[in-house]
Image (cartoon, rainbow, N blue to C red):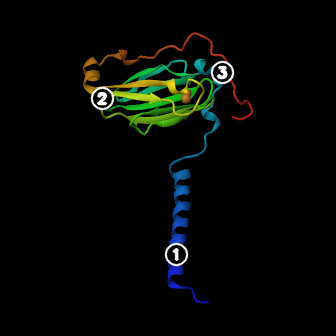
Amino acid sequence: MKVHSFENAFLAIGGVTLVACIGALVYATFGMGLHLPGPGGRIDPQRAYQTPPFDQLGVKQVAPNAFEAVVVGQMFAFIPPELRVPAGAEVRFIGTSADVIHGFNIEGTRVNMMMIPGQISRATYRFDRPGEYLLICHEYCGSGHHTMSGRIIVEPAVALGSAASPSTDTTTTPPSQTITAYSPHPSTR
Ligand code: CUA
């Protein structure tokens, strides 16, 4: 059987692409350790505010130039609504939801994750420019969805250096009112 040379070329391209994709998949799984969420990142959403790390909300320093920002989303606010972090530092956002699915999107950055009740979401980012960044919920979560926003205040790294005090820990305690359990679709998720 005669196979046209163009057909041969396309078959070869197809074969190479297939092998490259399988290679990427194997590398992502075993080389980078990417996998589906496991039970390790799960919490009881009704007890979100009592479950570490969400019993200590806000920003805290975890290493000389690394911070953790712990946030809970609930209809229709981020708690705490304002996070202050220094420029140039590695900030690890750790979030969850106390009720329904919310979004966690920081304007002008690649921080874009879902806050899913019962799951812990994480994203790491370094802000190079000081300023104020808008944090928005970009998953429709109910009648007040469009009002759900927060702020990330990135302070110049110099200010932090001169302040160099242990008081960079600005964690806030969870809201005292009990969160009424809301389960829109108990059967799904
Ligand atoms: Cu929360 Cu939309």
Q: Residues within 10 Å of mark 3 (few under 14, many from 20)?
A: some
Q: Where is residue 54 in the image (x, y as percent from the top left)?
A: 54, 21
Amino acid type assigned to the residue bearing label 1 in the image: Phe
Q: In which quarter of the image is residue 83?
A: top left
Front position in the image: 179 or 76: 76
The numbered mark at residue 81 is: none
Residue sitting at x 47%, y 35% = 123
- The reply, left or right, for residue 132 in relation to residue 54 is left
Q: Furthest residue to the right? A: 187
Q: Is mark 2 within 8 Å of ligand 1?
A: no
Amino acid type assigned to the residue bearing label 3 in the image: Gln
Query: In this figure, which residue is indicated by the disc labeled 3?
Result: 46
Measured Cα–Cα span from mark 2 to mark 3: 36 Å
Marked residue nearer the N-terminal end (1 or 3): 1
Q: Position of residue 152 (x, y in %)?
A: 40, 26
Task: State the SS at label 3.
Answer: helix
Query: In this figure, which residue is indicated by the disc labeled 1?
Result: 10
- The reply, left or right, for residue 126 in relation to residue 19 is left
Residue sitting at x 56%, y 51% = 29
Residue sitting at x 50%, y 32% = 104
Q: In which quarter of the image is residue 167?
A: top left
Q: Furthest residue to the top? A: 176
Measured Cα–Cα span from mark 1 to mark 2: 50 Å
Query: In this figure, which residue is indicated by the disc labeled 2?
Result: 130
Compared with residue 18, is residue 77 higher up or lower down, i.e. above or below? Answer: above
Amino acid type assigned to the residue bearing label 2 in the image: Pro
Q: Where is residue 36 in the image (x, y as percent from the top left)?
A: 61, 44
Marked residue nearer the N-terminal end (1 or 2): 1
Task: State the SS at label 1.
Answer: helix
Number of numbered discs present? Answer: 3
